[in-house]
Image (tube, rainbow, N blue to C red):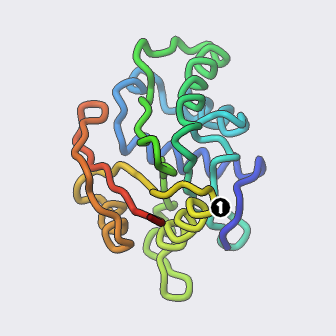
Amino acid sequence: MLRDATVVDADTVSILVLHELERRQLRQLRRVTKEQLSQLLFVGYHQPKFRYGYPHARVYENQGVAVGAAFGYPASVEVQLDNQWTALFERLQVSPPQVPVITPRALADEWYLDLLTVNPRYARKTYLQRWFDEWLMGDVLVRATASGQPVVGLDVRPGSRLAQMAAQFGFVGTQRRLLDRQPYYHLRYRLRE
């Protein structure tokens, strides 16, 4: 079942985000231990203006547990979200990185899908012949349409599962980017003209 994330989902969703950020291997987070990053994400999840806070998340719930999450927002909100990392580092008494953890990525006319992830235990399970991440992606398109933005944007690593799924949904590559010294493609899906 798809639904808005709540504060109660903090444990499961922050772990999903933790695993995704570990996969991304962000340089600014290398000095932070896994336990510290877990704490940062858990505390940040409760903050309304944090990039990975519950107001920006939708979850796929299976048997009462959030097994997948998608975080997204309009481009106009992204600049405010990035400032939350520094406050979290200070609050947990961890020395913040000198460079922003995540730089703004959304283009001005986009509703930006920042993160879509499913618990590996459920990654190869389906409901009504659709993968859990496909349900989340379909929900992303509905949310983006409701926001009034004309385009959905996301950045993917070449060859990743998310890149393959986005191509199946009709996303088109518009540019190649280096994010944190790693190659990514910026994909866009036009919702309306």
Image x and y of residue 56, in percent: 64, 47
Image x and y of residue 102, in percent: 44, 30
Q: Quick check: 134 left or right of 61?
A: left
Give whichever of 131, 56 is nearer the camera.
56
Quarter of the image where one finds residue 93: top right
Q: Secondary structure at mark 1?
A: strand
Q: Quadrant of the N terminus?
A: bottom right
Q: Which residue appears at 36% of the width and 32% of the height?
A: 26
Q: Quick check: 23 left or right of 113?
A: left
Residue for badge 1 = 66
Quarter of the image where one finds residue 158: bottom left
Image x and y of residue 58, in percent: 64, 58
Image x and y of residue 111, in percent: 51, 51
From what the image shows, is residue 66 above or below residue 28? Answer: below
Total labels: the figure holds 1
Residue reaching furthest bottom? 128
Q: Quadrant of the C terminus?
A: bottom left
Q: The disc labelled 1 sits on which kind of residue?
A: Ala
Q: Which residue appears at 65% of the width and 41% of the height?
A: 53
